[in-house]
Image (cartoon, rainbow, N blue to C red):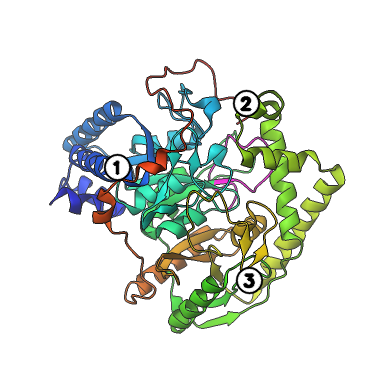
Amino acid sequence: MSKEELVSLSSVEMRRRIGTKEISPVELLDACLERIEEINPAVNAVTAMSVKRARQEAKAAEAAVRRGDDLPLLHGLPTGIKDLEETKDLLTTYGSPLYRDFVPAYDNVMVGRVRAAGAVVLGKTNVPEFGAGSNSRNPVWGATGNPFNPTLNAGGSSGGSAAALATDMLPVCTGSDTGGSLRNPAAFCGIVGFRPSPGMVAVERRAMGWTPISVLGPMGRSVADTCLLFATQVGQHDSDPLSFPLEPDAYAEPWPVDLGSLRVAYTEDFGGAPVEKGIRQTFRAKIKAMKHLFRSLDRVEIDYGGADRCFDVIRAVSFLSRYQDLYTNKREMLGPNIVANYEIGAKLSLADFAWAHGEQTRIFRAFQELYKEYDLVIGPTVGFSPFPWKQLYIDEMDGRKLRNYYHWMATKYFVTLTSNPAVSLPCGLDHKKLPFGLQVIGRFRGDGEVLGAAHAMEQAFKTNPELARPLPNIARLRKPTPALKSIVTHPPKLDARPAKGPAPAAL
């Protein structure tokens, strides 16, 4: 098997072949390193790397296979960790000049679990500064380009992970999601991103532990790949008061679901989110093409209510809790997204905070009413086609000014407010011949069910070119785009030594 064929295998198939000794972890690592060297200059998805240690881990994984040891779920699979997660002895910058030299002396909970599952952590994947916004560009590493056109946005904040998966540089990559950071890049890059129910994956770095809007979760080239990673991430941990006991093996494979038995509701804009005309037309065509797959597929009206202001408040309060010290003492080192979020929060009152939590509760309860009649709700993941990465965000739609720098993400943050689990599933191309993502939303805490339904849809979509997952043209990506790093103003020190203490409290 050629290296080209090897890296294009699913992570599930890679893991199976490692277990049967058809391929070796060392061989797989070398193939991924070659693909990174060849393609990463074009998309700038993989940032800091730990090649020497990864080789040692791959050799140890190979020896374990030869000995006949019991092999964990991710045994020998090269893995990328989003650069918001602390990784022992591997640069963790959060995309911020303030931490361009920060090398943690420990793995955080999620990373530790992924390592324990046999993952070979090869490197970090790019993010916006502190994960704020949905354009993975920062002054430390530069911008991540879209695999279908590197001059366009790969989405964010898990854009580096999505681009690395889409281009077969890495078979396993982690992500996180507040207002759509797993779902948006998955949609833009033509892969799968899953926002789990809060508490499924422990989040120790969340400053406000009882606030459920931020979650960690998996991405993959397929739903089965996504499940494989998810099963290694889930479980209770004392650092996260929302986490609860789970049986990880229950999520290692997609649950069986009969599409023909499902009653499905669909919405173009979730009752008020910005969705451009071209995406609406694309979505209508997709609905027509998949209607026959389900028992029923009905358009529904959703009570969007005060979702925009509600998300503004809840998000801003989170930023206040995390960045007060940095804003007060090092404001000049913070990017515009962080400053804007903090200043929104600083103007709020306790009455605003109380209203927002009351409104979120109302939105949650109203949304759950749909599941008395339907098994799933679907809609477009993103209301817009990928736009140039040099454009920080979308500020208007069809001639109408948007509210703020993340208003264009409303199709996703509405679902965040409901706390229902949601999959962004590749669903062909949009009106601009770029990847289109279908957001598949399950019932409250129905994580296994929605992954199973998404898997069944994925399998059905494969037979229809209008719905099947699109693939980037790898040959075109062999011509790098140096402009992706043109915004770097604070390059990292790649020889930085491990920090003695824990991660900064602000994070």
* Disc 3 versus disc 1: nearer the observer: 1
**Can you give x and y, in whole percent of width and height, for residue 347 in the image?**
81, 41
* Residue 182 seen in the current view: yes
Tell me the residue that label 3 is attached to.
371
Image coordinates of residue 51 in percent, x first then y, are 28, 30
Disc 2 vs disc 3: which is toward the camera?
A: 2
> SS for tag 3?
helix
Could you tell me which residue is drawn at 54 percent across and 22 percent down? 502
Left or right: residue 161 versus residue 213 is left
- Who's the residue at 36% across and 66% down the image? 469
Q: Look at mark 2 in the image and give the residue it sits on.
A: 505
Q: Is 468 on the left-hand or right-hand side of 126?
A: left
Q: In this orientation, which residue lies closer to the viewer: 459 or 231?
A: 459
Alpha-carbon span between mark 3 and mark 1: 38 Å
Distance (Cα) linking label 2 and label 3: 40 Å
The crowd level at tag 2 (other Cα within 10 Å; few <14, some 14-19, many 20+) is few
Of residues 451 and 268, which is closer to you in this image? 268
* Dot 3 or dot 1, earlier in sequence: 1
Image marks 3 and 1: residues in contact by CB distance under 8 Å: no
Which of the 4 quarters of the picture holds residue 58?
top left
The percent coordinates of residue 125 (x first, y second) are 41, 40
204 in magenta:
yes
User: What kind of residue is marked 1?
Assistant: Leu
Q: Which mark is residue 77?
A: 1
Q: Helix or strand or loop: what does disc 2 sit on?
A: loop
Image height check: is 51 above or below 445? above
Span highlighted in magenta in the image: 197-215
> Furthest-top residue in view?
500
- Is there a contact, CB below 8 Å, between mark 2 and mark 3? no
Residue at image position (69%, 26%) is 325
Q: Specify the principal SS of the magenta part.
A: loop
